[in-house]
Image: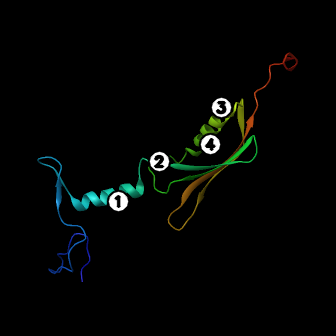
Amino acid sequence: MCVALVGCTNTGRTGGSPLIPDQAIRLTAHTSVSLTTLLVGAAIYAYYDPLAPNWEIEEERLDDETYRFSMKMKRYHTGGSGESIQILKRRANQIQREQGFGGYQILEYSEGIDSQTIGARRVAEGTIKLVKPQQADSFMLN
């Protein structure tokens, strides 16, 4: 018995009708794409999704001035392995501006690889503390 997406020709017999008909979609007068190629490409795009962000970030507020970030990189990517510290700093800067703080300090930061059954992923974690702006005081200048 033969099981295939577009039909079987290796034995001369067909094990039933194919799941995907062997048809082509005409794009221009001289260009066409087979339905099988189009569907396989769409499946790969949906699984891989090149426009999705490379990193997902979870944010936890520990107190009024301290935040913890846990970041995971998507499994299949074409770059972005060194972006985790930039993402942490960008988000810390955004929180700092939104809440009117003068800056932030990175209390801890680590990167690693999380080995899982379906492939390893790069991970990063960091904790920041927001810092209040210094007051202009003549006594502090001396």
Q: Describe the element under mark 4 as helix, strand or loop.
A: helix
Q: CA distance from mark 2 to mark 4?
A: 17 Å
* Location of mark 2 (residue): 79
Looking at the image, do the residues carrying marks 1 and 3 touch, with CB atoms under 8 Å apart? no
Q: Is residue 1 above or below residue 79?
A: below
Q: Quadrant of the C terminus?
A: top right
Q: Describe the element under mark 2 as helix, strand or loop.
A: loop
Rendering coords of residue 27 (x, y %): 18, 49
Binning the other alpha carbons within 10 Å of mark 1 as few (below 14), some (14 to 19) or many (20 upward) gives few
The tag on residue 134 is none
Q: Describe the element under mark 1 as helix, strand or loop.
A: helix
Mark 3 or mark 4: which is in front? 3
Rendering coords of residue 116 (x, y %): 55, 65
Hey, what amino acid is under mark 1? Ala
Hey, what amino acid is under mark 2? Gly
Q: Residue at x 36, y 54 (%)?
A: 45
* Location of mark 3 (residue): 97
Looking at the image, do the residues carrying marks 2 and 4 touch, with CB atoms under 8 Å apart? no
The one nearer the camera, 120 or 100, is: 100
Q: Describe the element under mark 3 as helix, strand or loop.
A: helix
Q: Earlier in the sequence, mark 1 or mark 4?
A: 1
Q: Earlier in the sequence, mark 3 or mark 4?
A: 4
Mark 1 or mark 2: which is in front? 1
Q: Quadrant of the N terminus?
A: bottom left
* Location of mark 1 (residue): 43
Q: CA distance from mark 2 to mark 3?
A: 29 Å
